[in-house]
Image (tube, rainbow, N blue to C red):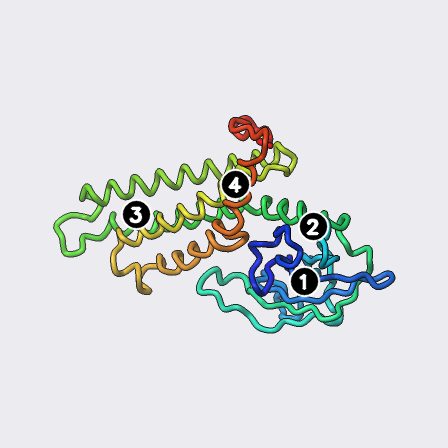
Amino acid sequence: MAFTEAAGGANFDHPDPQYGVQTFAVRDGDEWVINGRKAYTTNASGWDDEGADIISVVCRIDETKPPAESLAIIVVEKGTPGVTFSGIIDTIGHLATNSPYVDFVDVRVPVENLIGAPGDGLALTKGSFSWTCSSIAAAAVGKMRRAFEIAYDFVSTEKRSGSVPVIDHQNAGYMLADIKTRIEVGRYFAWKAADHFDKTGGLDRELSNMSKIYNSELSVQTVYDAMRLVGVDSYGDRAPLGDIMLDVLCLPIYDGGNMGVRRRHLHEMLRTPGYDPLAAAENRLSV
């Protein structure tokens, strides 16, 4: 999904048409002609660097109209002329994916490659990001769990020149208890968000966004505390906690940053007349 603009994607829904998404598609007969540049388009270059099979491009079809009327998602198939990859953003963690810049220069695709209707891109984009939330929340749990296991093994076996294993010290035991508690809270939240998303027919945006925010930020604190237990060895290659930290640092800022996108969407819901604060707990839509 080619979503993030090279200049940033948080304001994709900016109501003033002169701002926000600056990738445009102009209709020319039976084709859309797409021009623009995207960044952080996960795995868009494909595993062979020759392009993904399809790239869904978030764009606008009228530069004079706000996104509610002009935002669209158009599918571009592999091999379409005008699509180029102009460099990879080398991230410090999350290395299982790549993050290329993708340039679209006079890219022509059939009119029927538009998903939905003009303006539907706004709801489709928000819905797409809601779908990924509980997955990220679950990924955060996995990272926290692994960090706990490493720290637990360390304090259970290491004395560090002392007379007893580190776990026998009260402070270490209390930290482990706190870490494990956070993991279980995060696990149940991820499950709840996924279940709620299913039971609302994929329309939920409240618990999904909340779980992404909460678990992603929780994972950073939790991995850091695991590193504190292990000490300086966690900052080198004797324990893999440093690599785990580089991965979890990505979670709060990618796939819709918690500050730029996720909290804003929740704020939007809270301001909606008729918002029901108990609905999510009962598997109903809050708005």
Give the class, few, some or many, for how many residues have Cα within 10 Å of label 4's Cα (few <14, many ≥20). few
Question: Could you tell whether 260 is left or right of 285 in the image?
Answer: left
* Image mark for residue 23: 1
Q: Are marks 4 and 2 in contact (CB under 8 Å)?
A: no
Q: Nearer the viewer, mark 3 or mark 1?
A: 1
The quarter of the image holding the C terminus is top right
| Up/down of 87 relative to 228, above or below | below
| Up/down of 224 relative to 182, above or below | below
The residue singled out by tag 4 in the image is 267
The residue singled out by tag 3 in the image is 152
Question: Could you tell whether 198 is left or right of 28 in the image?
Answer: left
Q: Position of residue 181 (x, y in %)?
A: 35, 38
How far apart are labels 1 and 2 at the CA level?
A: 13 Å
Q: Are marks 2 and 3 in contact (CB under 8 Å)?
A: no
Q: Nearer the viewer, residue 175 or 124?
A: 124
State which tag comes first along the sequence, 2 or 3.
2
What kind of residue is marked 1? Answer: Thr
* Image mark for residue 121: 2
What kind of residue is marked 2? Answer: Gly
How far apart are labels 1 and 4 at the CA level?
A: 27 Å
Give the class, few, some or many, for how many residues have Cα within 10 Å of label 2's Cα (few <14, many ≥20). many
Q: Position of residue 30 (x, y in %)?
A: 86, 61
Question: Could you tell whether 20 is left or right of 228 in the image?
Answer: right
State which tag comes first along the sequence, 1 or 4.
1
Q: Are marks 3 and 1 in contact (CB under 8 Å)?
A: no
